[in-house]
Image: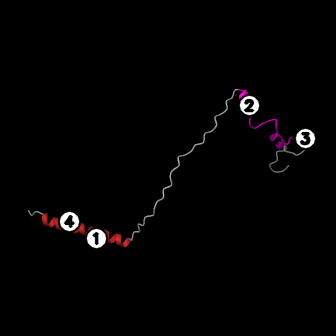
């Protein structure tokens, strides 16, 4: 006896054993029942599948827009805006402030 062998060998290849390929391919046992036979037994045929067609969307062509950003310029503009608002705040506070 070899390792894993249980001693019972049903898979031997002698002439008395049944070939599994012949059993699986036996024409007397259809894998799918005949449609006429199913109708005779009272089964109804399933409806034919309806293909689902999704609505087609038109192809939209987008034109590329050149929005290159140069970091130096954008930072300068931000600094200038900040200075202007600071100057206006100081100017407004000094001219509109009422002394007590």
> Mark 4 sits on what residue?
89
Residue 44 position by quadrant: top right
Indicate whether 15 appears above or below 93: above
Query: What is the number of the mark on residue 4?
Result: none
Q: Estimate the x, y position of residue 90 in percent, counting from the top left.
A: 19, 67
- Sequence-first disc among 2 and 4: 2
Residue at 10% from the left image edge and 62% from the top image edge: 98
Q: Nearer the viewer, residue 100 or 84?
A: 84
Residue 8 position by quadrant: top right
Q: Whole-Å distance between the Cαs marked 2 and 4? A: 93 Å
- Sequence-first disc among 3 and 1: 3
Tell whether 34 sits left or right of 84.
Answer: right
- For discs 3 and 1, the disc positioned in front in the rendered view: 1
Residue found at the far right of this picture: 15
Q: Estimate the x, y position of residue 31 in percent, counting from the top left.
A: 76, 38
- Sequence-first disc among 1 and 2: 2
Q: Estimate the x, y position of residue 74 in percent, counting from the top left.
A: 35, 69
Magenta run includes residue 26: yes
Tell whether 35 sits left or right of 99.
Answer: right
What secondary structure is found at the residue carrying circle 4? helix
> Mark 3 sits on what residue?
16
Tell whether 33 sits left or right of 21.
Answer: left
> Mark 2 sits on what residue?
36
> Mark 1 sits on what residue?
80
Q: Whole-Å distance between the Cαs marked 1 and 4? A: 14 Å
Q: Estimate the x, y position of residue 85 in percent, counting from the top left.
A: 24, 66
Q: Residues within 10 Å of mark 4 (few under 14, many from 20)?
A: few
Quadrant (top left, top right, bottom left, bottom right) of the C terminus = bottom left
């Amino acid at each position: 006896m070899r390792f894993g062998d249980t001693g019972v060998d049903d898979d031997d290849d002698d002439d008395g054993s049944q070939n599994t390929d012949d059993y699986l391919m036996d024409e007397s046992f259809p894998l799918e029942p005949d449609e006429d036979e199913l109708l005779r037994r009272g089964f109804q045929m399933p409806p034919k599948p309806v293909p689902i067609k999704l609505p087609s969307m038109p192809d939209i062509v987008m034109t590329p827009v050149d929005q290159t950003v140069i970091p130096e310029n954008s930072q300068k503009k931000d600094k200038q805006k900040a200075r202007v608002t600071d100057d206006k705040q100081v100017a407004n506070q000094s001219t509109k402030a009422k002394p007590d």
